Amino acid sequence: MKGFHEKTLDEAISLALAHVEPVTETERVLTTQSLGRVLAEDIICPEDVPGFARSAMDGYAVRAHETHGASAEHPRTLKVIGAVEMGQDPRTLPPVGAGEACEIPTGGPMPPGADAVVMLEETERPQHQIVRLFAAVTPGTHVLSGDSDFRRGELVFKAGHKLRAVDIGALLAMGILSVKVYRRVRVGLLSTGSELVEPDHRVRPGQVRQINSHVLQNLLEGAQGLFLGIVPDDREHLRAAVQQAVRASDMVVLSGGSSVGARDWTLDVLQELGEILVHGLQIKPGKPTIFAIIESKPVIGLPGNPVSCVIVFEKFVRPVLARRSGLRVLLPAHRLASAQLTQAVRSAIGREDFVAVRLRVDEAHGALYAEPIPGHSNNISTLARADGIVHVPSDFEAIPEGAQVWVELL
C-alpha cells in the first residue's frame, strides 16, 4: 500500500544534494546578458579600477602638510589655481604647488602634487583666487586610490558564483565584456490532473486552469523551463510523459499526483522508472513531496496545491536546482536572513543607514555571521562583494557587535 516515509526538510535536502551533479557544459556569453548565470571561471581583475586617484568629496585638492593647524579660529589661506572637470585626463591638470589648491568635484581626478581633499563645507572662498581652509587634513583624506574599486590581479569572483545585477556592473567596470558560464539547466515542467486545462482554454464545470507550471517557470531565474504539457490521471500517459521529460531535460519537476490517492500515479511511475529517495516532508504545506533519480537526473514530484507547490519549490527544489546549475555556495532561499554582526555598525540619529555585509557560515557551531564590508558609495565593489544589506533605523546611533540582525539578501 502506498504511504509516506517522511524526512525533515534538512534531511531531504542533504540526501538530494548528495545525488545531484552539476552540469559541466559551458558557453561564453556577453556580460550584459549574464544575469542569473553561474560562472564557470574565476574572474581576475585585469586592471586597476578606476585607474586614477579621485576625490571622494566636493572641495579642494591640497598638499596635506600645508593644512596643519587649520581651524575656524586660525584658517589657512591658499591660492586657487583652477578647477578639475569631470572626465578630465589627470595628466592635463596643472600640478598643485606650495601654497596652492585646486577646486575639485566628487569623483574628479586628483591633480598632480595634491594628496588630500578639504571638504567644501570646511572652506570659504572670499575671492576668486583665494580659499580659506578651516580644517586640517592628512595625506589620503577624502581621496580614493586608483585601485579603490578593484585591484589588478585581484580574485573578484570564483567559479560557481551566480551573477547578480551589481556583479554585471562590476564586470563592466573592469572592462570584462564576456564571461564563461555553465549552460542553463533545462528543467522539464509537467502538470498532472485530468481536471486541468491551460489558462487560455474555456473552463467547463469541474475543470480548473493549470497555473503551477507557469508559476514555476517564473521561479526558475537562470534556468530554462521546458513546459511539456498537462498529463491526465492515467498511469501509462504519465509514464510516457516522464520518460520524454527525462530525455529532454536536466531535471524534471512535476506538480500534482504525488499524494497517496487512488488516482495519484506519480509515486508508482517514478518508482518504476528510477529510485525514490524521498516521499514526504515534515512540513506544512508540502507534505506529499517526492524526490527520485531517473537516469542520473533529479525528478521531483510536488503537491498540486499551488501554495504547497511554491513553498516546496522555494524550500526544497531551489537548492537542488542551484546544485545542478553549478552554484558553489548555496545561500538560504528566503530573502531575509538572521545573522550576528561581527563588528559594530554606526550611524547618526535621524539618518537611516543601509550597511553592506558579507555572510559567513560557521558550520561547526551552526551560526551565520554578517561581516560589514568597508567601502565607499562610489565603489560598485562594495555591493559586488556583499551578500546583503543591514538596515540601521533612524533612531539608532549604532548596532553593537554581536547583535542579531535581519539581512536583506541581494
Image (tube, rainbow, N blue to C red):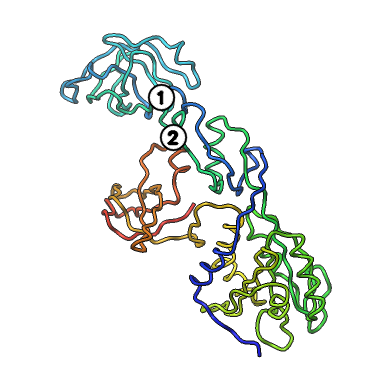
Question: In front here: 34 or 205?
Answer: 34
Image quadrant where one finds the N terminus: bottom right
Mark 2 residue element: loop
At label 1, counting other C-alpha atoms closer than 10 Å, the crowd grade (few under 14, some 14-19, many 20 or more) is many
Side of 410 relative to 226 (left or right): left
| Kind of residue sitting beneath label 2 | Asn
Q: Which mark is residue 54?
A: 1
Side of 141 relative to 303 (left or right): left
| Kind of residue sitting beneath label 1 | Arg
Residue 198 spot, x, y in % from top left: 79, 70
Q: Which of marks 1 and 2 precedes in the sequence?
A: 1
| Residue at image coords 48%, 38% | 156
Q: Is residue 147 above or below residue 277?
A: above
| Residue at image coords 81%, 83% | 205
Mark 1 residue element: strand
Q: CA distance from mark 2 to mark 1?
A: 10 Å
| Residue at image coords 44%, 33% | 149
Q: Is residue 372 above or below residue 56?
A: below
Q: Is residue 50 above or below residue 164?
A: above
Residue 395 spot, x, y in % from top left: 30, 55
Instruction: Answer with the quarter of the image where residue 280 lies.
Output: bottom right
The residue indicated by pointer 2 is 378
At label 2, counting other C-alpha atoms closer than 10 Å, the crowd grade (few under 14, some 14-19, many 20 or more) is few
Q: Is residue 121 above or below residue 160?
A: above
